[in-house]
Amino acid sequence: MRGATMLLVHARVLPLVAIVVLSGCGDGGSGDQSNPASELDLDCHVRVSMTEGELLSVAQGTVDYAGAPGHFVGAFAATECVRLDDRVSVQAANQCTGKNGTCRGDERPELLIQMQTANTLSAPLDLLDCRFAASAVPTLEDFEVVGVFASDPSLQPTTPPTIAVTSVDCDASASTTTLPPAGPCDGIECESNEVCIDGDCVVTDHYLVEFQTDLAATYGAIDFNVRYDCVDGSFDGDTTGVACTLTPSLNLFGVVNDLGCSLVEGETYVAVAAVSAFGWAGPGPLMACEYTSATDQPPTVASLRVEMEDAATPAGRPLTRATVSVSAIRPLPPSM
């Protein structure tokens, strides 16, 4: 069984053991959680970190912010949180489903967070930066982490790390947009094998290849290969050091391996596997990889063939019609 498939099988048990719960907007709390984000004055960012201990595999806990004057922005997979360290997968899902993430009725104000790492990580470790709409600046005391639980790779309980909200930064909500000044390459169009640098079109051999999911669905796991011919060029890096990045906003736990051109002649492939306990919505951006051409031409959609292995929902239901395609090929400054 290939490593990617093993990753998919392991991922389907994660929701049972890997949830961090950030509770807020609670019943009877003193905070202002009823107003939609557009009516609150402050646009804040709440940082969640591991401050003591180690993360061996997965962890869970509860952060109570019932007294905080506001709410996290977005709901479920659309919660506006960004992972802060590429070594750990952290996925957030706000459980309040009102406008912009407000709580409705008796909904419990909980932000579910799933953490997973393939390697042991030690504190201090920044995990997430989450957008928070507020009527006043929250304090660190508004957030209390309780009930932290952790397990090792065999899903056996282990000593949990200490998880805490470590910073809250707020700015007044902006009503106007300031455009950046025009750059030297604005309005300049170059050939497909050229890139604009300081106002001049320069021939390049370096490209960014972007991939997307095509099927409208909620994905929990995906597994595919990207086949290419070494005669035409190759993806930068090799083996597990291939220069590919999964879309950061999806907060996926993934593995990208490149067989490379040093061990084979002709066709080879990049193997990709990614999982999310709470899922992510498609179609949309999935991954971007750096590519160096061995000719004087950029790669094409035809020269980069995507072969699907597996795709599934967060519940493990197969997505048999799922596909991944090349969505863009963009020139980069020449490789040195």
Image (spheres, rainbow, N blue to C red):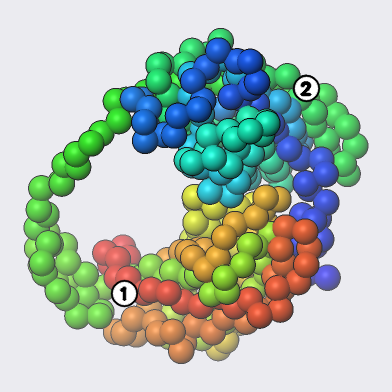
In this orientation, which residue lies closer to the viewer: 244 or 325? 325
Q: Where's the C terminus, which quadrant?
A: bottom left
The nearer-to-camera label among 1 and 2 is 2
Q: Percent x, y for residue 275?
A: 68, 57
Q: Percent x, y for residue 289?
A: 46, 66
Residue type at numbered disc 2 = Gly
In the rendered image, which quarter is residue 154 located in?
top right
**Is residue 146 depicted above or below 237 in this figure?**
above
In this orientation, which residue lies closer to the viewer: 159 or 249? 249
- What number is the disc on residue 205? 1
Left or right side of 305 for 135:
left
Q: Where's the N terminus, which quadrant?
A: bottom right
Q: Are marks 1 and 2 in contact (CB under 8 Å)?
A: no
Dot 1 surroundings within 10 Å: few (below 14), some, or many (20 or more)? many
Left or right side of 94 for 162:
right
Secondary structure of residue under mark 1? loop
Q: Residue at x 57, y 86 (%)?
A: 267
Q: Residue at x 16, y 76 (%)?
A: 190
Q: Residue at x 83, y 44 (%)?
A: 16
Q: Which residue is tagged 2?
A: 147
